[in-house]
């Protein structure tokens, strides 16, 4: 995952934030969050958000402040 914005979205997802909360914090649209979230899920080969959270924990990626 090389894209900085994808990383920011991933941190929000891991923190349990809703797409609209992530969008507001990053000053992007909710649709853009959904696109980045999908790209992260695909790149990480995560089948669910729970998978993504476990992977992030193993990688030491901390949740964004919610």
Image: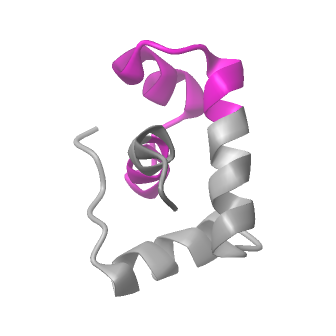
Relative vertical location of residue 21 with respect to residue 34 in this rendering, above or below: above
- At which x and y percent is residue 19? 58, 31
In depth, the one of 28 and 21 nearer the eye is: 28
Q: Could you tell me what secondary structure mostly forms the magenta stretch?
A: helix
Determine whether, in the image, residue 39 is placed left or right of residue 22: right
Looking at the image, the residue that sits furthest to the bottom is 58
Determine whether, in the image, residue 45 is placed left or right of residue 52: right
- At which x and y percent is residue 26? 39, 22
Task: Give the quarter of the image for residue 8.
Answer: top left
- At which x and y percent is residue 28? 51, 15
Residue located 44% across and 57% down the image: 14
- What's drawn in magenta, residue-wise? 9-34
In depth, the one of 2 and 27 nearer the eye is: 2
Looking at the picture, the colour scheme in use is one colour
User: What is the count of numbered marks?
Assistant: 0
Relative vertical location of residue 59 with respect to residue 27 in this rendering, above or below: below
| Residue 6 lies within the magenta run | no
In depth, the one of 60 and 43 nearer the eye is: 43
Looking at the image, the residue that sits furthest to the left is 65
Quadrant (top left, top right, bottom left, bottom right) of the C terminus: top left
Relative vertical location of residue 41 with respect to residue 54 in this rendering, above or below: above
Residue located 63% across and 64% down the image: 49
- At which x and y percent is residue 56? 42, 73
Residue located 40% across and 44% down the image: 4
Relative vertical location of residue 43 with respect to residue 24 in this rendering, above or below: below
Determine whether, in the image, residue 21 is placed left or right of residue 41: left
| Residue 32 lies within the magenta run | yes
Residue located 62% across and 56% down the image: 40
């Amino acid at each position: 995952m090389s894209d900085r914005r994808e990383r920011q979205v991933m941190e929000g997802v891991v923190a349990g934030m809703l797409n609209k909360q992530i969008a507001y914090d990053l000053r992007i649209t909710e649709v853009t969050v959904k696109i980045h979230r999908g790209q992260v899920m695909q790149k990480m080969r995560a089948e669910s958000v729970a998978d993504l959270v476990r992977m992030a924990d193993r990688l030491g990626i901390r949740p964004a402040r919610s």
